[in-house]
Amino acid sequence: MERRNNGKKPKGHPYLAKFSSPMRISPEKIEEIRSANDIVDVISAHVRLKKRGKNYLGLCPFHQEKTPSFTVSAEKQLYHCFGCGKGGNVFTFVMELEKVSFAEAVRSLAEKVGIVLSFTEVDQEKQNETEVLYNACRFAGLQFYNNLTKTDEGRGALEYFHGRGFSDETIRTFGLGYSMNSWDSLLQRSKEEGIKQEDLLKAGLIRMRDDGGAYDYFRGRAMFPIFSASGRVIAFGARKMRDDDAVQGKYINSPETPIYNKSRVLFGLFHSKEQLRSQDTALMVEGYADLISLYQAGIQNVVASSGTALTEEQVQLISHYTKNLTLVYDADSAGSNAMLRGVDIALAQDLDVRIVELPEGEDPDSFVRKHGGKEFLKLVEQSISFIDFKARQFLRLGAFATPEGKSEAVRSIVQSIAKMKDELKRNFFLKDVASKYDLYESVLYRELERWTTKEKQSFRKEYAVNQTSGDSLPANAIIKRDEIPAAERDILKLLLEHHFEPVNLIFSHIALTDLSNESVKKLLEFVFSRIDERGTIDFMELVEELEDPQLKSIITDVAVSKYELSQQWSKRETEIEEADPWDIARGAIVSLKKQTLQKHIEENQRLLKEASRQGGDAMPFVQRHQELIKQLKETESPEFLKSSEGLEPLEG
């Protein structure tokens, strides 16, 4: 490796064009990037979409579903899932899918279409905290890389990486580095660059002494930067290099920070995500070196759990790219045993799970270095189902020597099958177990029913707790939005399509208080305020400005839906999407007038009963009831829409 590079970062380095001071992207540039990225193209890279009329349909990437409810509108450049309610534009999709900030989503989409970003410098204090932390981590990663490649002290770590078989290109690709064996090397260098000590502390790069002094957290260690799915450095893993290193642990990792939660991150995902998608399978290993060795050997559809037990969030990350997960089992590793306990989590997320068993004493890194990538792929081809793996584990423990042990083993397998949401798949696996262990299927079905019932009860309990506490729902919960009357949805749709005059007609006959849905009232107040300020509304700006996810969901839902006053349109044999806005307005007025009259009738009935009970004069309420019923019948008559009572003339 070239140890001197005249201050230039090598080509292909992960920090190249990533390190910058905090900046704000101009609104004009955001609009340019949005216009250049067709939402159908962007989403098609992650979701299989099929054309359905004017829109595209696919399985939602944000929750598990069997029937497609995820709709993408090429015309409106937005998406909405009618199952979980998530919706938005192309920026929102990238933010939700890759768990990144708005600025990072914009940056990612700009790079995709080759747009050079123009920035406006702003004070660091005004920047979003996460951007400051991203910059601190980028700075540290670059310093660690320079320490490795440009200092004499770093030579030992470089030789260690070479000894692991990592080429110079691989070292660059993964941005490997070295932290100097000093208490304040990174701290002093950060001062020269104007990076605040408090930002390094929040990013987990330094620690504070009791006397108020600060010191580097990573010292004298080989460094493995951890990247987000979009390619930003968010944390580090550090490998011990010296025997006299007083810090406990062969590996230490960054503490959790606002940008790093280890249960929600997979090491190597940024490098491997395209291969996960193209090969439609993910290999899961444990350690940094395991992944890097496989990647260098050409096996690039691989991610690492970094020694943590497989979590629901990590499985969800994988499911964005593939539904097939293969766990690489290292029999000598407690970390791998913990990882394998995540099999049930993967099954519950509707992933197909298989296991690769390595020879005794081998891990992926050592096996590939000894035998090469082709031999490793042969092991992958011989992977076994989770049923066979569990059975082998019980066999090794001697469980099959007794009836009690056999029942425990089979019960454990059935418990895993119960995690599956797909009933047909469950049945096939159950038949397989019955055949292998010579059991009656009916016995297994009773056991399965027992565990599936427990799963449902557990889910309902978790759902209820989350509803009470205000926390987000479980990942597999379907978020049900408020039921919105068709007329109120149609008013929103008319507004979003800039049919302002028909909307004015509606509100010349009804008041905002006549609407029944509180969310619609909030949205209309918000939209009307924007129209008052700007003279019009921009749908894309509206989606970005709304902070309430429920309101944003309703907006995208309405925008991609057809008009809903379908009874009138079916009578006229007219396509709903081609309906005249003035007809929509008339229908909304009729519906809302009926709704209001029904409320008046109910209230009048209550007052009538109250008057009768107290011995008062009930006649006024009887007369009022007759008047309201007459108005209601007039409203329901076919002639009402054609009448001249405030609804004509309606020529646009």
Image (cartoon, rainbow, N blue to C red):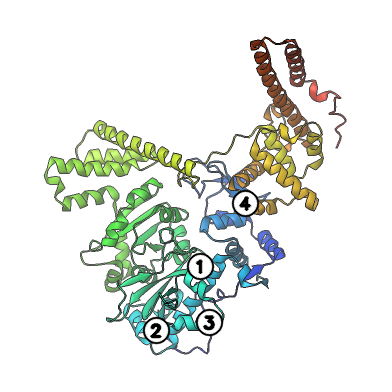
Give the Cα separation between the discs numbered 2 and 3. Answer: 15 Å
Mark 1 lies on a secondary structure that is: loop
Q: Earlier in the sequence, mark 4 or mark 3?
A: 3
What percent of the width, then of the height, locates residue 465? 44, 41
Query: Does the CB distance between marks 1 and 2 fall below 8 Å?
Result: no
Q: Looking at the figure, which quarter contains the C terminus? A: top right
The quadrant holding residue 612 is top right
Mark in the foreground, 4 or 3 = 3
Quick one: label 1 or label 3, which is nearer the N terminus? 3
**Which numbered disc, 4 or 1, marks the residue closer to the eye?**
4
Give amino acid for label 1.
Answer: Gly
Amino acid type indicated by mark 2: Ser
Can you tell which mark lies on residue 191? 3
Q: Position of residue 195 (x, y in %)?
A: 54, 77
Residue under pointer 4: 547
Question: Could you tell me how far apart the alpha carbons at marks 1 and 3 are, in whole angstroms?
Answer: 25 Å
Pointer 1 residue: 231
193 and 147: which one is in front? 193
Q: Which mark is residue 573?
A: none
Q: Nearer the viewer, residue 268 or 373?
A: 268
Marks 1 and 2: which is nearer the front?
A: 2
Q: Earlier in the sequence, mark 2 or mark 3?
A: 2
Estimate how packed mark 2 is, as few (under 14), some (14 to 19) or many (20 or more) residues with alpha carbons within 10 Å. some
Query: Earlier along the polypeptide chain: callout 4 or callout 1?
Result: 1
Q: How many marks?
A: 4
Which element is circle 3 on? helix
Sequence-wise, which precedes: disc 1 or disc 2? Answer: 2
Quadrant of the rendering where the N terminus is positioned: bottom left
